[in-house]
Amino acid sequence: MTNPYKQILVAIDCSEESTQVLGRAAALAERDGTHLHLIHVIEPLALAYGADVPMDVSDLQSSLVKQARDSAMEYARRYQVPESNVHVELGSIEKTIQENAEKLDCDLIVVGSHTRSGLAILLGSTAKGLVPGANCDVLAVKITDQ
Ligand code: AMP
């Protein structure tokens, strides 16, 4: 069967479960001519804690971005994703993933998905939030405890 996907964007939160998501995306990208991009999004501190954080957090923000890039690069190396295909971005998670998928002309977004129960069902998941605004297919990889 031919692989219908030519540009795949895999979203990782850089936790250990990222190997499950990346592993699935890498297997899909194994066919000739398919490019794998990796994205990790950092929510700006002002977004996470409100616009009026009572101090200058730009140094802290820069060091968080640097740490996140190092971590994303570590995962990228394990799955032979070239540095030019690693995207570490500041913004809201779902919107930034959707915008990058569009910019990179991706035909598939691969994202992890946790089984939810109780209150978490009401809060919703990243995968669920991604689908309505995405201009391409979205694959939700079930995360299993390992
Ligand atoms: P959830 O079920 O909402 O916890 O979503 C987990 C999945 O969403 C992760 O496996 C990633 O695919 C994606 N995700 C969560 N946070 C981020 C992030 N900061 N950057 C990129 N992808 C993320």
Image (cartoon, rainbow, N blue to C red):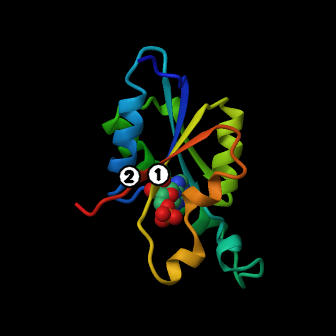
Label 2 sits on a secondary structure element that is: helix
In this view, the residue farthest toward the top is 32
Q: Nearer the viewer, residue 66 or 130?
A: 130
- CB under 8 Å between discs 2 and 1: yes
Q: CA gap, disc 2 to disc 1? A: 6 Å
Q: Residue furthest left?
A: 146
The quadrant of the picture occupied by the C terminus is bottom left
* Residue that carries the numbered disc 1 in the rendered image: 12
Residue 94 visible to an observer of this rendering: yes
User: Which circle marks residue 18 in the picture?
Assistant: 2
Pick the residue in front: 92 or 130.
130
Q: Say whether mark 2 is within 8 Å of ligand 1.
A: yes
Label 2 neighbour load within 10 Å: few <14, some 14-19, many 20+? some
The N terminus appears in which quarter of the rendering? top left
Amino acid type, residue under disc 1 in the picture:
Ile
Residue 96 on image: x %, y %: 67, 51
Q: Residue at x 56, y 36 (%)?
A: 108
In the image, is 67 to the left or to the right of 88?
left
Query: In terms of depth relative to the viewer, which is nearer, 36 or 82?
Result: 36
Question: At 45% from the left edge and 17% from the top edge, which residue is drawn?
Answer: 2
- How would you rate the neighbour count of disc 1 (Cα within 10 Å): few for under 14, some for 14-19, many for 20 or more? many
Can you say whether 33 is above or below 140 in the image? above
Q: Is residue 58 above or below residue 135?
A: below
Name the residue type under label 2. Answer: Ser
- The residue drawn where x is 70% and y is 36% is 102
Residue 78 location, x and y as percent?
A: 31, 38
Say whether mark 1 is within 8 Å of ligand 1.
Answer: yes
**Image coords of residue 54 (percent x, y):** 72, 85
Residue ID at (45%, 29%): 82
